[in-house]
Image (cartoon, helix red, strand yellow):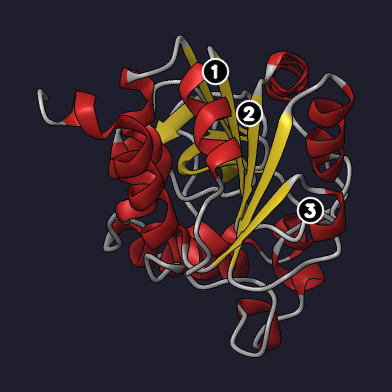
Amino acid sequence: MTQCSTRLISKLKDAQSVVVFTGAGISAESGVPTFRGNDGLWTKFKPEELANVDAFIRNPELVWEWYKHRKQIIASIQPNAGHYALARMEQFHKHVTVITQNIDNLHRRAGSTTVHELHGNIEHNYCIDCGKYFDDQEIMNHDRAPRCSACNGLIRPDVVWFGELLPVEEWNESVTAAERAEVFFSIGTSAVVYPAASLPMIARRAGAYIVEINIEPTEFSSRADEVLLGKSGEILPHLLEVCYQSALKHI
């Protein structure tokens, strides 16, 4: 595990606004399957068959079966030490904002209170006809694609599918947070999928200190002010201890 610099420690201690941008890597440490890589979910299924509106309309049973399986997997998984460390940072800074590309809800379950979900939340669902929202408890007992109790329309997961735009409010709030960040963490993401990948550079142009945490270097590494190689579940608790050790003793 790469050790954090004294410069990072100093900047983090002084920061009023900290922004954290997370990708699949942090969730993979909890056991959430990733889409890419040798063992990614996309090696077993073609994205176009499962994650777009046309595919859902054409074969709702297949798409529902796959998402129900994913929901069950994610429901059985717990946040890891990295998620909890990020939530704990809220005790030491005026603003801690998490911007995530993950749909697993692990940041909220770990206790983070300001979370912008750029790709939606797999635990939320809505009717494609009338827009009524449903939580998983209402629909997970369905063997077939669930139907809306109000209009009988198909219910889909509230996640961003291929060909769909990011949610406007979540995106605008993410940009605002990046522009006011003093320290900006990019964690577990290759930061190459746009428009989300533009957030670290928005923060950098606004003067933030950019820190990448990943298990290996990425295309973004050369543009970060500091790169910490290793698992976020090890690096973040260590960073928490180093930066706030005196305060933590009284909590």
- Residue tagged 2: 183
Residue visible at 53% across and 29% down in the picture = 10
Residue visible at 34% across and 42% down in the picture = 242
Residue visible at 76% across and 79% down in the picture = 46
What residue type is disc 3 on? Ala
Q: Which mark is residue 39?
A: none
Give the image location of residue 55, x and y in percent: 77, 62
Regarding residue 99, the answer to whether it shows in the image is yes
Q: Earlier in the sequence, mark 2 or mark 3?
A: 2
Regarding residue 138, the answer to whether it shows in the image is no
Q: Quadrant of residue 246?
A: top left
181 relative to 110 in the view: left or right: right
Q: Above or below — where is 75 with respect to 110?
A: below
233 relative to 213 in the view: left or right: left
What residue type is disc 1 on? Ala
Q: Are marks 1 and 2 in contact (CB under 8 Å)?
A: yes
